Amino acid sequence: MLSDGRPGLRIDALRERLGGLAYGGDYNPEQWPEKTWAEDVALMREAGVNLVTVGVFSWSALEPEPGRYTFDWLDRVLDLLPENGIAVDLATPTAAPPAWMIAAHPEVLPVLEDGSRLTFGARQHYCASSPVYRAGAAALVERLAARYAEHPALALWHVNNEYPGVDGCHCPVSAAHFRRWLADRYGDLDALNDAWGTAFWGQRYGSWDEINPPGPVLGDPNPSQVVDFRRFNGDASLECFTAERDILRRHTPDVPVTTNFMASYKLLDYWKWAAEEDVVALDAYPDARDPIGQVRAALNFDLMRSLRGGRPFVLMESSTGPMNSRRRNSARPPGQLRLRSHQAVARGSDSVMFFQWRASRFGAEKFFSAMVPHAGTDSRVWREVRALGAELRDLAPVAGSRVDADVAMVWDWPSWWALELRGRPSTDVAFHDQALAHYLPLWRANIPVAMVAPGADLSGHRLVVVPNLYAVTDAAAANLTRFVEDGGHLVMSYFSGVVDEHDHIRRPNAFQDLLGVRVEEFNPLQVEETLTLRWSDGPASTAAEWQDLMRAEGAEVLAVFEDGPFGRCPAVTRNAYGRGTATYIGTRLDDARLRALLLDTASAAGVRPVADVPDGVEAVRRGEHLFLLNHTDEAVIVAVPGPCVDLLTGTRHEDALGLDPQGVAVLRGQPL
């Protein structure tokens, strides 16, 4: 919770002001003649828009010269919107420093790892450590907050855009900032040398001034240094965010503040960031043609909801149609816009918003879709946008409610960073792939999942799934062990508990006693190599990617490697520990076997699916409402054992309902 203890009150006030769910998108009036604005707000009313984001990249429009501010155009925009029932998510435009700043202070531009400096001409072209950038951003935000603190349009503050920009600046200013950050973290050089293991390859530091950000080296860089530099980069950007947030808070203590996250994004530890904002906001752009795009979207929605302990999040950006970031940017099939928008709401979003309101005629994203496309209002996209707005008004009772989950999945950014560095037994072990593989069976079974940090309170969950936790602190390892000891069920996959937070090898493995196994060697399998698994309770299956060479020390062996050069040895085990159980998977199982193992463990833990529905139908209970989302191209019938009403149609269902292809129902009553 934020230090002032009021984020819940701020968000409740926002929800009450909007009368339910937020609907709208990024509005960039500075790109259009002023005569277009009246048409915009008329169309917004027609579409049911009640919230728009304004000003994200407008620094040069608001401050065209140093210290000369031109707020008059923004005054007229902000006056126009509330007159038409539209509230504003007002952005600080600090993701796009103006050309005059870069011309006067080229050192603001970030330096990449190879020593090259970015140039002006896109966005997010700033070093987060730059005092020039920080001072300029603070001065503009101070003016912005003072001018609009009492404006009736203001409903939400939106700081910057999609931090962090570059993946770590390597300029001299950043290097000096990094050294100060290290001194604060470690206190003295002996502690740093120990944490970084600088005795290896003679890397010991005798002065703070000798330390620089990791750069190109012969061979592999120091992994402990690389992980700390990742931590520092996140903290440097977070300092920028909190500096702006504090200015906004001083002027508008009752207006919530957020910034937009980028789903399961590797570069930032979103657990730290979410604790500093009132509400989590998400930019989500799943591929329209990805056969499991709905699963990736669901995982990201669950992660965003979990970052604030299950509180609703805000879908700040999504797309009505094609993007411009992929090799081939396909249009959304009919019905997918509606289906995926309702999926976000089902999984905890209190909004559906898009980038952007009106498609741009120029610039790098002119082929990016919008609520008002280039084809205008006589178009399929506009008709879908307008229909969606009407449906979201009917879902006002859903706003503010929660999704409960008996299953938790451990998600840890520092472990992710350390796992995917060079110099590992296999560079093909990817955290996100592991997470998705373990999430998919639970999604298909309609079992809700909450994401948790490894040190989080786990007492509200029955089953904890750990797809990979390569790096773990002593406290986090003890927390997971205590969860099992107190009666919880845990499933952990391979290459977990191997190192501490400094990327130092643990001896023994952090979870050896909990799992009841001793891993002696790691044997990554070759790309086409598979092994046969013999199970104690069923037919054989195949294993790929990885083989732990381990022996059971108290654990029950559920499956063994049947072949390969190392002979028969345990592959999957289960250990009774305290009042709970810990299941360990020492290889990559095929989809069917992983699904069976996870669902068997979930059942033993007392976890039940939300509903018994046909394959391809997603069922999510949010508060007292049950969302049914048909992700197939076939009509289906879903059994309803009790009377209920569909909020979208007003239809009462007694025993069954039909869902069209890509269809949605939101049921209230006592269904399923």
Image (cartoon, rainbow, N blue to C red):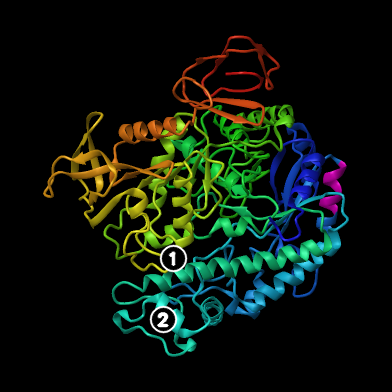
Task: State the image quarter where residue 380 is shown.
Answer: top right
**Stretch in magenta:** 76-83
Q: Give the overall secondary structure of the magenta segment.
A: helix
Please state the horizontal and vertical placement of residue 355, each as a whole percent of the image.
Answer: 63, 46
Which residue is label 1 attached to? 501
Residue 106, numbered label: none
Closer to us: 2 or 661: 2
Q: Residues within 10 Å of mark 2 (few under 14, many from 20)?
A: some
- Which residue is farthest bottom? 206
Residue 193, numbered label: 2
Looking at the image, residue 383 lies above or below residue 311: above
Closer to us: 214 or 328: 214
Left/right of residue 35 with respect to residue 102 in the rendered view: right
Q: Is residue 79 magenta?
A: yes
Left/right of residue 92 with respect to residue 251 in the rendered view: left
What quarter of the picture does the N terminus occupy?
A: bottom right
Rendered residue at 32%/31% (across/down): 592
